[in-house]
Image: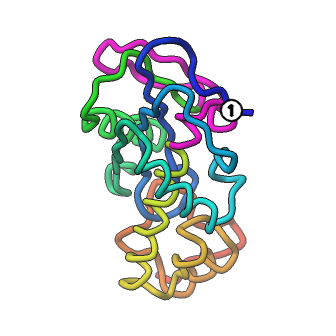
Amino acid sequence: MLKSSFGKKIEAGCDEAGRGCLSGPVVAASVILPKNFKNPLLTDSKQLSEKKRNILEKVIKQKAICWEIGTVWNKDIDKINILNASIKAMHLSLERLKLKPELLLIDGNKFHNYENIPHQCIIKGDSKFASIAAASILAKTYRDKLMNKLHEEFPQYGWDKNKGYATKTHRQSIVNYAPCKYHRKSFKLLPLQLKLKL
């Protein structure tokens, strides 16, 4: 059962999607839910089918006090590394919130202080707190739609299905067609046994 809140303060849950991908941006969401918000479907986005995520996305957007998205693209990921890019995406989403939170609930174990607002890092927070689970769903659904759009530009990589993750078919496509402008050049795009055509 997800906890609805950590305490009595105005809390924003933060989570990201796409951290382990070979291509595309990392996307973060920040969500402030009403106190005692409950939904029987709500859990970590990775545990949900695409259909359930899409249902919950609508519910969260309707019921949340406020929510926002932050996106950091692959070129910035290559410059500042994926951890810093993930935190930057969270900061961008927090910056856009219409209500200033008093406490930040962060999924994971690393975060950089944001505007001196106290924060609590929670490992597997998306399966413990409703606001983090809600953020995980909004980040994931937003990023999935974005990867579907990028797929139209570069259909050869199958991003409509793999969403940029390191599947066997995605890696084989990188061998066949070489990386494109949306690939993260700082990532190990291929295992040693696969060679790029240059």
Q: Residue at x 55, y 59 (%)?
A: 21
* Boundaries of the magenta span: 108-134
Give the percent coordinates (x, y) of residue 170.
Answer: 60, 76
In the image: residue 144, left or right of residue 98: right
Give the percent coordinates (x, y) of residue 38.
Answer: 61, 38
Q: Residue at x 57, y 32 (%)?
A: 107
Q: Is residue 91 magenta?
A: no
Q: Nearer the viewer, residue 97 or 74?
A: 97
Residue type (three-letter) at the residue carrying disc 1 = Leu
In the picture as drawn, the residue positioned furthest to the right comes out as 1
Give the percent coordinates (x, y) of residue 123.
Answer: 66, 28
In the image: residue 174, left or right of residue 63: right
Res. 28 image quadrant: top left
Please tell me whether residue 96 is drawn above or below residue 6 in the rendered image. Answer: below
Res. 91 image quadrant: top left
Please tell me whether residue 53 is drawn above or below residue 40 in the rendered image. Answer: below
Q: Which residue is mark 1?
A: 2
Q: Is residue 133 magenta?
A: yes
Give the percent coordinates (x, y) of residue 109.
Answer: 59, 25
Q: Look at the image and tell me in which quarter the N terminus lies.
A: top right
